Image (tube, helix red, strand yellow):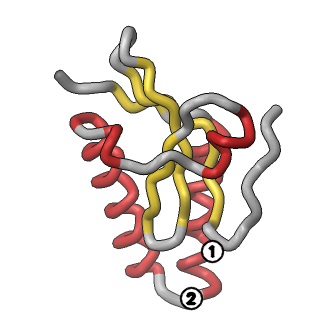
């Protein structure tokens, strides 16, 4: 069985900001394009195997099962809804940033 990956607008915005940062600060639009391709390939992997990702630190902070996908140091946080067969992104941040407090 596969899952549908639902990305929130805020996560999509954060991913695009990171790609823009790679292109501008790293001086390499090609690296930014390659990184975005890895992000979307990772999304496709979540369709089949969302539980291969470990629990996030945020999971302990809020008490919910939040998992983390590490893409070159960029962390995509998500929840799994088995009943609806949906993987929902909840946040994204660079790995050097502190975990977010639960809201």
Residue at 68%, 73% in the rendered image: 96
Assign a secondary structure to mark 1: helix
Q: Report the residue marked by disc 1.
A: 21
Q: Residues within 10 Å of mark 2 (few under 14, many from 20)?
A: few
Closer to the camera, 35 or 90?
90
Q: Left or right: where does residue 38 sit relative to residue 96?
A: left
The tag on residue 54 is none
Residue 63, given in percent of the width and then of the height, sits at 67, 31
Q: Quadrant of the C terminus?
A: top right
* Cα distance between the residues tagged 2 and 1: 7 Å
The residue most toward the top is 83
Q: Is residue 49 left or right of residue 94?
A: left
Q: Which residue is mark 2?
A: 26
Residue at the image point whose x is 53% and y is 51% from the top = 76
Residue shown at the point (58%, 33%) measured from the top left? 8
Tell me the quadrant of the picture where the N terminus can be found: top left
Going 39% across and 80% down the picture, which residue do you hit? 30
Q: Earlier in the sequence, mark 2 or mark 1?
A: 1
**Vertical order, 76 against 71 (above or below):** above
Packing grade of label 1 (10 A; few <14, some 14-19, many >=20) is some
From the viewer's side, name the closer residue of 41 and 64.
64
Return the x and y of residue 69 as percentages of the image width and height.
45, 53
SS for dot 2:
loop
Above or below residue 32? Residue 28 is: below
The spot of residue 27 in percent (x, y) is 55, 90
Picture quadrant where residue 71 is located: bottom left
- Answer left or right for 10 relative to 55: right
Residue 27 vs 94, above or below: the answer is below
Q: Quadrant of residue 46?
A: top left
46 vs 27, left or right, is: left
Answer with the quarter of the image where residue 20 lies: bottom right
> Residues at badges 2 and 1 in contact (C-beta under 8 Å)?
yes
């Amino acid at each position: 069985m596969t899952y549908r990956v639902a990305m929130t607008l805020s996560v999509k915005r954060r991913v695009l900001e990171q790609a823009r940062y790679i292109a501008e600060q790293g001086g390499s639009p090609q690296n930014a394009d390659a990184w975005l391709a890895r992000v979307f390939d990772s999304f496709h992997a979540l369709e089949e195997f969302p539980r291969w990702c470990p629990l996030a630190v945020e999971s302990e902070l809020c008490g919910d099962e939040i998992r983390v996908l590490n893409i070159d140091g960029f962390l995509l946080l998500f929840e799994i809804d088995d009943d609806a067969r949906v993987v929902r992104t909840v946040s994204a941040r660079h790995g050097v940033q502190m975990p977010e407090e639960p809201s």
